[in-house]
Amino acid sequence: MIIERNTTPFVVFSEDPVLNALQKITANQQRIIFLVNESGILQGSLSDGDFRRWLIANPTESLETSAIQVANKNVRSYPISTDAAVLNGEFAQGISHLPLVDERGHLIAIAMNEQKVLRIGQHEIAEDKPSFIIAEIGNNHQGDVDFAKRLVDLAVESGADAVKFQLRDMEALYRQKGSASAGEDLGVQYTLDLLSRFSFSVEQMYEVFDHVKQHNMDIMCTPWDAPSVQALVDYGIAGMKIASADLTNHELLRDVVSRGLPMMVSTGMSREEEIRESVKLLQNHGASYALLQCQSTYPAPFKDVNLAYMDRLAEIGQSLVGYSGHERGYHVPIAAVARGAKIIEKHFTTDKTLEGNDHTVSLLPEEFKAMVTQIREIEEAIGTAAPREVSTGELMNRVNLAKSLVATRTIAQGEAVSEDDVEIKSPGRGLQPNYLSQLVGRTMQREVEAGSFFYEGDLKDDLVTRRDFTFDRPWGLPVRYHDYKPLIEEAKPDFLEFHFSYKDLEIDIDDVFDSKLPMSFTTHLPDLFAGDFLVDLASSDQEIWERSIIEVQRTIDITRDLTRYFTTDDDPIMVVTMGGFTKDAHIAPIARADKYERIGEALKHLNTSGVRLAAQTLPPYPWLMGGQQFHNLFLDPQDTAEFSDTYDTALCLDISHTMLAANFLKMPLSEAVDLLAPRSIHLHLVDGVGVDGEGVQVGEGDVDWAALGKQLRGLSPKSSFIPEIWQGHINNGEGFFTALDRLEKWL
């Protein structure tokens, strides 16, 4: 249980429209709000369920109806002084939120049946959220306000979620201070001397806090005494950190708890019974808190860090746990995150040789940034405990490296498959070997030639219908030279799109075609060339840039020559992945302009007469050669549109790629389509999942196809399209025809 004293996210006025109440419920993600009058007196509650019941009973009522008319007016409340055991008893009955009121009925706080959530300013820290990373500046500012502000700026650049300071009232905190400490031990004398010179006054601390706010960054601070607690409350601090030295200071704990602020509590220098005693106090007072594993030596020996104790802390506290590190380096915090730490606190400085022992265990800005980067990578790598799925990259490699069930002889349609009819061969394009028992005895609904693959469709009783389709725009099929004929036997596309491999470019087209086909065509630049070469018209490497131009020109020339075998009214489209990829990380957005200019310069060297180039929109994490890389260009819809206008180059809008880009950029797909569709002469229609799940079957990913279809009809009504489903060509285009069947109702 926690007692939330910041009631603003959970309260509306009784006479406010019910729409306002629903917006509050959406924002707080708690499925409930409380209603008060203008004096703040509790008058009712409104939950998701209350609203649904009201709407069913009053389907014609306006959302401008006052919230009190919809609310539960018999909401149960408790005095703010109610013992925690009583409140927990209510939670045991299934109640999740209890309003707490003063003697006059004013809503003071809300008791919530949760513990493993901590809200610090704009951050919600939870087990399913990224870890909260704190740059602990503490007293490393050396008593210099300007230096403190500089450290804040550097912490922002280093990727910290929050900065933390320490505030002391020396008069209230120490029995002797400054030069009056002659009777103290040497260590205390040293500490007091540093603090007397380096501690900020309240006014100085406020000035630094104001600077932090300019960065829209969360602030935390450690109060070492009651006057400091009050000063931080007066400023409006988002959360407080309790130092290890104060874990047993129950008066300070009670003081902070009474302010209703979330707390992070370090556990260094304490025995387990002391930790348990303080946890009991926090729980009894409904504190919102997390426990931090900490070794309070500077620097801490690795043998004493004991990250494994975080498991025990989580059990003791029934709370989130984190790690406050004083060891050298930043590899231990990364390991802590891997073990479940949701909060990382690490000291921050610009010079480890400055006076004070905190500097010795601090990270420099570049080290802190590296730690943040690696923590975020580790968090991605941790994943979930859900059943294992095969990643997109693995699917690609599975096709290349795995085995398939292959026919040892030609099996006629209507003939049953025997065990002798099947052998296991590479590559993995067909049915996996573990399906052998399901395949044997099946009656084939198609002729299977000797040496060809069996497919998943061979295990089904109903085949995907290959038929003519009706669309309000030209539609085609993605093909290779070797497989286009069977794909057009039963369906009659308006055009074919040849997805070239670099080996296809060496084939004499006169050996492929013997007559003119009654349809048009498009082409697609190979993704890979001999020698693991990827076309990059944006490359600053002159050799790569020049070869890229050569390979694009060669493909243009072949595209132009193909017109001899097709019925074309317009110049054929050639889809080009222009380049701009990196192997290790995305480049800064500001660096994109130079790369777009480099592509623009390359385009001047190409003879494109008789061919229309279309720059393909790209995903953030492309799968190239079976491994993930990083795309930087044609990713952001804004600069993609600007490139198209500046260099008079049309686009190929790849919906899968753009869906992934939209997810990556945290923008609606519709906004991207608004910018890209009017500039697109060709479409690749395919679904996508997350930020790197491309090539997904239509209707099985994140795309709202009904909404997209409406947009495309309005913004790009004549653009041609293909269903570019990953491995859609297998089993005579089963994936393509499934997609077309689904797309027909939207296009």
Image (tube, grey):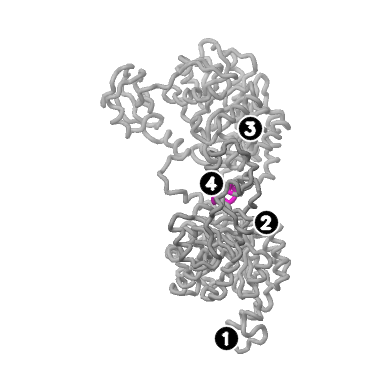
Instruction: Establish if 517 lies above or below 676.
Output: above
Q: Mark 2 points at which residue?
A: 38
Residue occupying image coordinates x 58% and y 82%: 187
Q: Residue 477 carries which label?
A: none
- Circle nearer the N terminus (4, 3): 4
Residue occupying image coordinates x 56% and y 65%: 80
Q: Residue furthest bottom?
A: 183
Instruction: Establish if 251 lies above or below 434.
Output: below
Q: What stretch is highlighted in magenta?
A: 25-31
Residue nearer the viewer, 570 or 126: 126
Determine whether, in the image, residue 729 is placed left or right of residue 597: left
- Circle nearer the N terminus (1, 3): 1
- Circle nearer the N terminus (1, 4): 4
- Circle nearer the N terminus (2, 4): 2
In x, y percent, where is residue 663? 58, 41
Q: Distance between the residues labelled 4 and 3?
A: 38 Å
Instruction: Establish if 388 lies above or below 9.
Output: above
Q: Mark 1 points at which residue?
A: 185
Residue nearer the viewer, 478 or 268: 268
Quadrant for residue 497, please give it: top right
In x, y percent, where is residue 271? 45, 74
